Amino acid sequence: MKYCSNCGAPVEHRVPPGDTLPRHVCPACGSVHYQNPKVVVGALAEWGGRILLCRRAIEPRQGFWTLPAGFMENRETTAEAAARETLEEACARIQVGALYTLFDIPHISQVHLVYRAQLLDLNFRPGEESLDVALFDEADIPWREIAFRSIERTLRLYFEDRRRGHWPLHTGSILPSTNPPFD
Ligand code: ZN
């Protein structure tokens, strides 16, 4: 941030009185512009044991496969975000089920949540941000072409849990990696 979104004056980066971290502070109007982590929400939607994946049309990780997921919007619930992202990226309607994975990714200041879900019909097709959308059996998952580590970990947990027949909520952290996928 270079300019104050309240008054347009150049901002300074410093620790405000009584705070502990540097913030973007406007010397003209006194506004403190806080920056906080972003929440990314996705859906693991099933149909007859197969999983809905989208191939990304946009960066980052263009051409790689992912679960439908994206940044939460203001004034929606996380479950609504999962359904909205699935509609936007796969033009697919789902019934959102239980929260399944929650990963903290502190080095990029994000939190990734994935809900389990049921696909309601087979009338899906690529949305604006997808090159392709398809249902995958476990044996056909393109493991080397999954876009993000939170999604790969969610898919691996899903197939393990399906074999065991129980569905706990999984939580964890994803730390920086020197190998792709980077985050
Ligand atoms: Zn200002």
Image (spheres, rainbow, N blue to C red):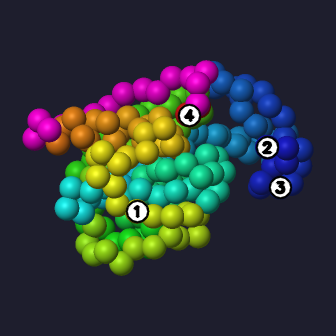
Mark 2 vs 3, N-terminal side: 2
* The N terminus, quarter of image: top right
In this view of the protein, which residue sits in the foreground, 10 or 140?
Answer: 140
Amino acid on which disc 4 is placed: Pro
Mark 3: which amino acid? Cys
- Numbered badge on residue 7: 3
Q: Is residue 126 above or below residue 52?
A: below
Q: Which mark is residue 1?
A: 2
In 3D space, how far apart are the residues under numbered discs 4 and 2 (Cα atoms)? Answer: 28 Å
Q: Tell me which amino acid carries mark 2.
A: Met
Secondary structure under badge 4? loop
Q: Is residue 58 visible?
A: yes
Decide which of 83, 67 is in the foreground and name it. Answer: 67
Evaluate whether residue 81 shows in this view. Answer: no
Q: Residue at x 32, y 31 (%)?
A: 171
- The residue closer to the viewer here, 45 or 64, is 64
State the CA–CA distance, disc 2 to disc 3.
13 Å
Q: Upstream in the sequence, badge 1 or badge 4?
A: 1
Quick check: is 98 in the magenta stretch?
no
